[in-house]
Image: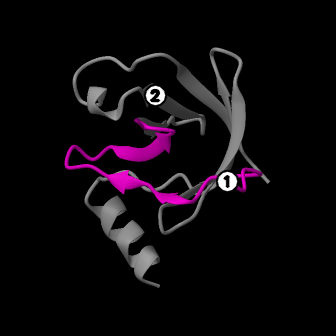
């Protein structure tokens, strides 16, 4: 119930809601994976038992961000949902590049959500 109240408060305040569902992410470099986003902001990579779920965060700038570790490197992804339902993911490697200009590397489009 707390997650639903938080989402309603976010919508009323004009902040983005979590893009709840299962998404097939296809990176411009050809890499792909499926992720699941829960209503409480839990983000997890599907079919990746070695990866632990993490939390999607709402930044002070009202952006949805996921921080992950890839070995010793901390990376960030910023998520936007377009008006036609496409999930756009901007990748920042390392995560400290977030907020310092353009995304590094791939811009990702997701066809979804998938069921």
Indicate left or right for 34 with 14 as reference.
right
Highlighted range, magenta: 46-75
Of all residues, the one furthest to the bottom in this rendering is 1
Instruction: Please state the total of marks drawn on the protein image.
Output: 2
Nearest to the observer: residue 3 or residue 28: 28
Q: Residue at x 47, y 56 (%)?
A: 18
Indicate left or right for 80 with 94 as reference.
right
Nearest to the observer: residue 63 or residue 96: 96
- Looking at the image, residue 58 lies above or below residue 4: above
**Residue 108 at x, y = what percent?**
57, 26
Label 2 element class: strand
Residue 97 sits in which quadrant? top left
Dot 1, crowdedness within 10 Å: few (<14), some or many (≥20)? Answer: few
**Mark number for residue 73?**
none
**Residue 74 at x, y = what percent?**
40, 38
**Residue 25 at x, y = what percent?**
66, 34
Q: Residue at x 45, y 28 (%)?
A: 90
Q: Which residue is mark 2?
A: 91
Quadrant in the picture for the C terminus: bottom right
Residue 102 sits in which quadrant? top left
- Looking at the image, residue 37 lies above or below residue 26: below
Measure the C-alpha gap from mark 1 to mark 2: 21 Å
Q: Is residue 57 magenta?
A: yes
Q: Would you say the residues marked 1 and 2 are in contact, meaning their CB atoms lie under 8 Å apart? A: no
Question: Which tag is nearer the camera, tag 1 or tag 2?
Answer: 1
Q: Residue at x 39, y 45 (%)?
A: 65
Of all residues, the one furthest to the front in this rendering is 72
Indicate left or right for 101 with 52 as reference.
left
Q: Which residue is mark 1?
A: 50
């Amino acid at each position: 119930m707390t997650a639903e109240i938080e989402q309603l408060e976010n919508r009323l305040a004009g902040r983005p809601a979590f893009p709840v569902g299962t998404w097939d992410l296809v990176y411009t470099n050809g890499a792909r994976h499926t992720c699941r986003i829960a209503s409480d902001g839990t983000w997890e990579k599907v079919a990746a038992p070695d990866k632990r779920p993490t939390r999607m965060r709402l930044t002070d700038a009202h952006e949805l961000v996921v921080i992950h570790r890839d070995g010793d490197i901390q990376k960030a992804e910023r998520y936007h949902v377009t008006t036609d339902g496409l999930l756009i993911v901007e990748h920042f490697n390392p995560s400290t590049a977030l907020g310092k200009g353009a995304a590094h590397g791939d811009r990702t489009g997701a066809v979804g959500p998938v069921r």
